[in-house]
């Protein structure tokens, strides 16, 4: 299995992600040097913010528990080999609908989950930022779409998103930086089905190159995106914001697990404790940003409890870890007469967001969902048939002979923020001696109605395209919430800039900020938030408000 035993970003150099075996220079700081920002996590939120802050002239160290990948050498098109990309440390999961944790929602390594994500880059529906006041459900965000729009644009430009000339949903926008990819056969099944029932569809905007960019090649449509892209076509944080951050003077510390945020007597963070190279060390910092995603961020805040903050940091109102959300993900599958070969090209290439924008009374639920064409790879597909459909032996072998004819759709379904869906810390400890997270999740009645409705829509589309022998399965994707942002200190963990209400030099910058989950994939919104946060912090520094 893919494994990196020793830190690579050491002694003033870091791996060059664009050239095999080569290095790029990296500024390094001493543990006792008080840097401006210590950032925990280098994924969609942390890696993007590290770049923004370093480019603004701050001294920055970004820590990641996982390795500093070399895409051209580490990533191979082998479903069995790539397990090291995921956060598979032990976590306890429970509730009425326990979330499966691992490859489908947690990355571990420089670039975070964007290293193995599916690259779908969608903006939110503008009204979702005020969904309580405008659509009558969920809760309002402290910022509006108008405030975030320039940062969506900044993130899309940084990732050179390849998208259609005209995307039918969200607000009218200027053209995507790169042209759209041709839609694969699996996507065309969605397209035909949507057209058959009179519902709009679109090629997906994707964070993979449709033309060369510097030393990165365009996508070659091999379809191994969920196992690390070995051509660098995928515009993960590892090959976009991290090289920029290093170039601007940031240090990245790989294989560095942060265990605790250190607090001073004045109630401010003084730095953090991290485990690297077999020993615990301390790094001094003027500000600490937590960007470990929706489970590890609350976990670190809770594990950092001390005499002054007995319930954990930023947790005076008991909200840290609460209102955790996932996206529900039922799928509908069928068999087509013709060969589809759904494994060719990135897994999701076509989408309908129709039900995200349907405010009619034909819906018996609040919120929305989008669904995308799917491209499972053979080993994963065989596992799914065994687990979900109880197939084994000759039955499984026969089913696999039909693999090239399979077509499927899966939703990204909004779930409601509920207080009892949460991350806590358990008594059990991990390999570092740190209490492990306990994750509890149950769908609401509304979530269940949404799921049932979506199955009907996906069936209609697949049948419209001519699929036969339909069956359904259930999955979840993405994690959001746990440290929600807000305008009311009694009702949120951090303010509209991700700054803790009670500890002025402690910040959060990742998917845990989300007050609601929306009905599309989250990472473009996380990156837009991180870009905005970078600019806000620079502005505060100039005004002497840091
Ligand atoms: C299989 C898969 C497919 C996906 N597809 C899409 C998609 O198509 N479109 C989309 O928008 N989103 C997608 N997502 C979701 C998206 O990748 C995440 O929402 C996003 O990356 C979350 O950003 P983040 O910064 O919150 O966390 P991450 O990107 O997960 O980064 C967190 C980082 O923090 C590190 N870390 C955590 N705790 C510590 C600690 N204590 N010390 C040191 N380091 C720590 C982790 O190692 C990790 O690298 C997908 C996710 C997965 C897993
Ligand atoms: S299909 Fe494209 S983005 Fe996916 S792994 Fe292959 S080259 Fe990379």
Image: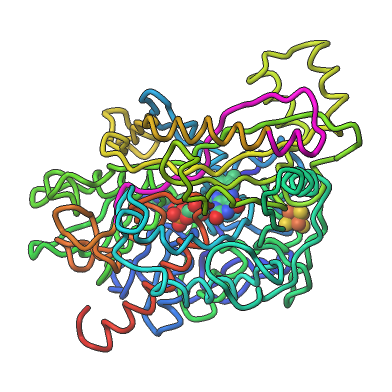
Residue at 58 percent of width and 62 percent of height: 169
Quarter where residue 81 is shown? top right
Residue at 39 percent of width and 31 percent of height: 443
Quick one: 147 or 48, which is closer to the camera? 147
Residue 66 in view here = no
Residue at 22 percent of width and 62 percent of height: 500
Is 473 included in the stretch rendered in magenta? yes
Is 20 included in the stretch rendered in magenta? no
Quick one: 304 or 475, which is closer to the camera? 475
Residue 87 percent coordinates (x, y): 50, 41
Residue 17 percent coordinates (x, y): 66, 66
Q: Tell me: residue 336, above or below residue 370.
A: above
**Is residue 74 toward the left or the right of residue 306 in the image?**
right
Residue 339 in view here = yes
Residue at 68 percent of width and 39 percent of height: 409
Task: For the N terminus, give its image quadrant.
Answer: top right
Residue 102 percent coordinates (x, y): 52, 37
User: Magenta segment range?
Assistant: 460-484
Q: Tell me: residue 527, above or below residue 248.
A: above
């Amino acid at each position: 299995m893919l494994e990196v035993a020793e830190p690579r970003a050491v002694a003033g150099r870091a791996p060059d992600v664009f050239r095999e075996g080569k290095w790029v220079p990296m500024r390094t700081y001493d543990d006792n040097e008080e840097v401006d920002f210590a950032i925990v996590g280098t994924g969609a939120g942390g890696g993007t913010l590290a770049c923004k802050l370093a480019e603004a002239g701050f001294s920055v160290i970004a820590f990641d528990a996982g390795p500093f990948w070399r895409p051209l050498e580490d990533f191979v098109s082998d479903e069995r080999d790539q397990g090291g990309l995921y956060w598979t440390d032990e976590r306890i999961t429970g509730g009425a609908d326990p979330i499966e944790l691992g490859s489908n929602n947690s990355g571990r390594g420089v670039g975070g989950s964007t290293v193995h994500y599916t690259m779908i880059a969608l903006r939110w529906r503008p009204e979702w930022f005020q969904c309580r006041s405008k659509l009558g459900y969920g809760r309002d965000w402290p910022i509006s779409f108008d405030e975030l729009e320039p940062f969506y644009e900044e993130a899309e430009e940084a990732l050179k998103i390849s998208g259609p000339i005209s995307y039918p949903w969200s607000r009218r926008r200027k053209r995507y930086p790169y042209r759209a990819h041709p839609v694969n056969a699996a996507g065309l099944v969605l397209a035909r089905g949507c057209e058959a029932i009179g519902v709009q569809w679109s090629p997906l905007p994707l964070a993979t190159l449709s033309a060369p960019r510097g030393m990165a090649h365009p996508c070659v449509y091999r379809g191994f995106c969920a196992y690390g892209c070995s051509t660098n076509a995928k515009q993960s944080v590892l090959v976009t914001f991290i090289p920029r951050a290093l170039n601007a003077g940031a240090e990245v510390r790989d294989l560095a697990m942060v265990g605790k945020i250190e607090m001073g007597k004045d109630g401010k963070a003084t730095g953090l404790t991290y485990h690297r190279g077999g020993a615990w060390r301390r790094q001094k910092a003027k500000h600490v940003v937590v960007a470990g995603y929706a489970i590890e961020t609350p976990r670190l805040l809770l594990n950092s409890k001390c005499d002054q903050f007995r319930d954990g940091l930023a947790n005076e109102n008991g909200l840290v870890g609460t209102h955790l959300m996932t996206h529900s993900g039922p799928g509908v599958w069928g068999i087509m007469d013709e060969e589809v070969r759904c494994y060719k090209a990135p897994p999701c290439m076509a989408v309908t967001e129709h039900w995200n924008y349907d405010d009619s009374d034909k819906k018996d639920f609040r919120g929305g969902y989008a669904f995308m064409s799917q491209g499972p790879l053979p080993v994963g597909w065989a596992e799914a048939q065994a687990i979900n459909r109880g197939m084994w032996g000759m039955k499984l072998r026969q089913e696999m002979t039909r693999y090239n004819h399979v077509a499927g759709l899966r939703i990204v379904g909004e779930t409601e923020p509920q207080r009892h869906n949460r991350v806590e810390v358990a008594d059990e400890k991990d390999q570092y001696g740190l209490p492990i997270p306990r994750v509890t999740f149950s769908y609401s009645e509304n979530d269940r109605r949404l799921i049932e409705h979506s199955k009907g829509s996906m069936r209609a589309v697949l049948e419209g395209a001519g699929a036969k022998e339909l069956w359904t399965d259930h999955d979840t994707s993405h994690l959001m919430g746990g440290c929600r942002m807000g305008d009311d200190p009694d009702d949120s963990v951090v303010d509209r800039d991700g700054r803790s209400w009670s500890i002025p030099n402690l910040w959060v910058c990742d998917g845990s900020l989300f007050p609601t989950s929306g009905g599309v994939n989250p990472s473009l919104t996380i990156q837009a938030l991180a870009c905005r946060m970078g600019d806000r912090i620079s502005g505060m520094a100039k005004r002497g408000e840091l």
